[in-house]
Image (cartoon, rainbow, N blue to C red):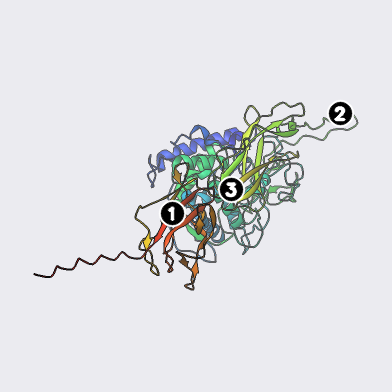
């Protein structure tokens, strides 16, 4: 909910400016230049040039609550369980179910993406700024909000223009999108970022467990490490592209790090101010404000505020105008927002994507490029293109996700993140579509091949010999490589063959033993280890003497033939008899 896009055109700029000044003042009075974890404070940090992620934002840059943390740091206190909260505790306290959702999301991300280092305090800070912790914890026992939390419709009237992408399924609005739920996802983002955090088989943006887990995955994409301030800045700005938003979220992060506690659901303190100077996210799509109602309920049921002016859709106010006489005064038709870049897209074209092939477990060296074009073939920039991996596959983008959204550049081209092959081999389909525009998708095919080796070599040079009926003293070990690099996880077979010209298995000579101790002369389903090494089981010999061949083959065509010798031990010649004495 970026301020530069999401604030109201009139009063919002002043409100956000005041909030920014307050943040700066709070930084000077409350926090040192370096925070408790040794990182530079957000108010002093400068995001890198790519801090504005190409995904746009999770929230569509909708408005957010600008209330600052109290100057006095919180002191942790025991969980209050049920019953009324103690005076003065609700400011730092987090409703029990909401806090549980944040901590469970942190645990899940630590397991799924340990390199992200997601702290639950970050989720709590975003939840506070986006929805006042689900309107003070007004959720049911399963974590679903008692009524929907909706941001204003993103109709371009003081906000970003995002036309409907879900046919009103999540926000009840079939004309424009609105941010939904305690973490304020817009429907087009929830469509790919949504998660089932409470294992009920559904992905509901109005459920705090689902929304918190989705927010965690969203913040952890792109291989970001949130223990690094630069990556943390990028992640927060990708949630809502506003410097003021970043500063505010970091203030709440540091506040919660210094201590917080659990309070009963429904007893949290509600924020008062928003970046658009509005009254807050709407509690439900079916509760419009009546202009002559004396008071307007604040979000979540806080004390009513005077409302001399009617609300505009989604928050904010307008000055009432006297009724016009339809017989004498012409009616001015409502203004229609000008078409966006997205509205002009007619189709997608491939932008020179090379053949996509990788071995299982490897990263694809080539990336998908798609160009958005008008009907006349003109490139369209600043359009969001969503890349989705289709079907049952474990191939993902490098961040571990199966969906990525990228904005087209000035040439109309969007380049997808690199793909990483999974263990499943075969063809993988990646579909490119335009976010917010119904045009035919463009499918790309990527091929995952099995791991391969192009060379095999023995790791030792000891002779492989054995007496008839005995066992070979040395085991055969080989190393597989591919283009000079270690070839790990490569499938291989080992066969004792009849001759160099006849690769069929022999029925005599050396052999391996199976689990039952029976002789076998072909081993399948072998695989090189992480170092590319393959050590074969012990070899044994029957009573046949001679020279035998062991052939090892790998996926990719690498072949090595090893000689085995079975021979009776040499006996020493008897010494000549002594001549008889004369």
Looking at the picture, tell me which residue is in the foreground, 376 or 522. Answer: 522
Using the rendered image of the protein, determine whether residue 235 is visible from the camera's viewpoint.
yes
Q: Earlier in the sequence, mark 1 or mark 3?
A: 3
In which quadrant is the N terminus drawn? Answer: top right
Residue ranking furthest to the left: 582
Q: Could you say where residue 425 lies in the image, as x and y percent from the top left?
A: 60, 51
Per the model, the C-alpha gap separating discs 2 and 3 is: 70 Å
- Verify CB contact (< 8 Å) between mark 1 and mark 3: no
Q: Nearer the viewer, mark 2 or mark 3?
A: 3
Using the rendered image of the protein, determine whether residue 11 is visible from the camera's viewpoint.
no
Q: Could you say where residue 400 lies in the image, as x and y percent from the top left?
A: 55, 48
Q: Could you say where residue 12 lies in the image, as x and y percent from the top left?
A: 61, 35
Please identify the quarter of the rendering in which residue 301 is found.
bottom right
Q: Nearer the viewer, mark 1 or mark 3?
A: 1
Residue 338 lies left or right of residue 69; in this view the side is right
- Residue with the mark numbered 2: 330
Which disc, if any, is residue 34?
none
Per the model, the C-alpha gap separating discs 1 and 3 is: 28 Å
- SS at badge 2: loop
Q: Is residue 272 above or below residue 572?
A: above
In which quadrant is the C terminus drawn? Answer: bottom left
Residue 196 lies left or right of residue 362; in this view the side is right
- SS at badge 1: strand
- SS at badge 3: strand
- Residue with the mark numbered 1: 562
- Residue with the mark numbered 3: 449
Q: Earlier in the sequence, mark 2 or mark 3?
A: 2
Q: Earlier in the sequence, mark 1 or mark 2?
A: 2
Looking at the picture, tell me which residue is in the foreground, 155 or 379. Answer: 379
Residue ranking furthest to the bottom: 516
């Amino acid at each position: 909910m970026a301020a530069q896009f999401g604030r109201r055109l009139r009063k919002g700029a002043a409100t956000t400016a005041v909030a920014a000044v307050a943040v700066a003042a709070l930084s000077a009075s409350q926090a040192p230049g370096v925070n408790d974890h040794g990182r530079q404070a957000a108010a002093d940090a400068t995001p890198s040039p790519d801090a504005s992620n190409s995904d746009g934002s999770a929230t569509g840059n909708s408005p957010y609550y600008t209330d600052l943390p109290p100057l006095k740091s919180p002191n942790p206190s025991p969980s209050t369980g049920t019953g009324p909260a103690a005076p003065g505790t609700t400011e730092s306290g987090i409703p029990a179910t909401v806090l549980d959702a944040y901590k469970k999301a942190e645990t899940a991300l630590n397991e799924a993406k340990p390199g992200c280092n997601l702290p639950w305090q970050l989720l709590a800070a975003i939840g506070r700024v986006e929805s006042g912790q689900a309107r003070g914890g007004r959720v049911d026992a399963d974590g679903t909000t008692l009524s929907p939390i909706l941001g204003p419709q993103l109709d371009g009237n003081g906000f970003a223009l995002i036309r409907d992408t879900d046919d009103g399924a999540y926000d009840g609005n079939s004309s424009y999108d609105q941010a939904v739920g305690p973490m304020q996802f817009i429907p087009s983002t929830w469509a790919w970022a949504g998660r089932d955090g409470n294992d009920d088989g559904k992905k509901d943006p109005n459920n705090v467990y689902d929304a918190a887990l989705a927010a965690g995955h969203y913040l952890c994409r792109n291989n970001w490490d949130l223990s690094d301030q630069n990556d943390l800045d990028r992640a927060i700005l990708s949630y809502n592209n506003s410097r003021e938003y970043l500063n505010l979220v970091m203030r709440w992060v540091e506040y919660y790090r210094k201590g917080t506690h659990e309070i009963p659901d429904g007893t949290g303190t509600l924020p008062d101010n928003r970046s658009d100077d509005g009254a807050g996210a709407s509690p439900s799509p079916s509760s419009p404000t009546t202009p002559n109602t004396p008071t307007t309920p604040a979000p979540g049921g806080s004390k009513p505020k005077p409302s001399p002016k009617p609300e505009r859709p989604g928050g904010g106010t307008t000055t009432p105008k006297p009724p016009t006489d339809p017989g004498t005064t012409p009616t001015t038709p409502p203004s229609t927002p000008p078409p966006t870049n997205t509205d002009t897209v007619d189709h997608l074209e491939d932008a020179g994507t090379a053949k996509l092939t990788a071995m299982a477990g490897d990263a694809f060296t080539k990336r998908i490029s798609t160009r958005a074009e008008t009907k006349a073939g003109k490139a369209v920039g600043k359009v969001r293109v969503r890349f989705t991996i289709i079907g049952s596959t474990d191939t993902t983008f490098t961040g571990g996700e199966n969906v990525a959204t990228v904005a087209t550049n000035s040439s109309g081209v969007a380049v997808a993140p690199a793909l990483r092959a999974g263990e499943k081999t075969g063809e993988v389909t990646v579909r490119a579509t335009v976010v917010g525009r119904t045009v035919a998708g463009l499918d790309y095919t990527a091929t995952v091949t099995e791991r391969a080796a192009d060379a095999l070599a023995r790791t030792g040079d000891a002779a492989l010999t054995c007496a008839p009926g005995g066992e070979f003293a040395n085991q055969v070990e080989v190393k597989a490589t591919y283009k000079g690099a270690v070839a790990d996880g490569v499938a291989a077979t080992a066969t004792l063959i009849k001759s160099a010209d006849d690769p069929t298995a022999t029925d005599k000579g050396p052999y391996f033993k199976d689990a039952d101790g029976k002789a076998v002369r072909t081993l399948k389903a072998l695989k090189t280890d992480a170092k590319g090494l393959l050590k074969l089981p012990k070899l044994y010999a029957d009573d046949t003497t001679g020279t035998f061949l062991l052939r090892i083959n790998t996926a990719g065509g690498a072949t090595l033939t090893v000689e085995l010798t079975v021979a009776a031990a040499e006996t020493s010649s008897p010494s000549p008899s002594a001549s008889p004495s004369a």
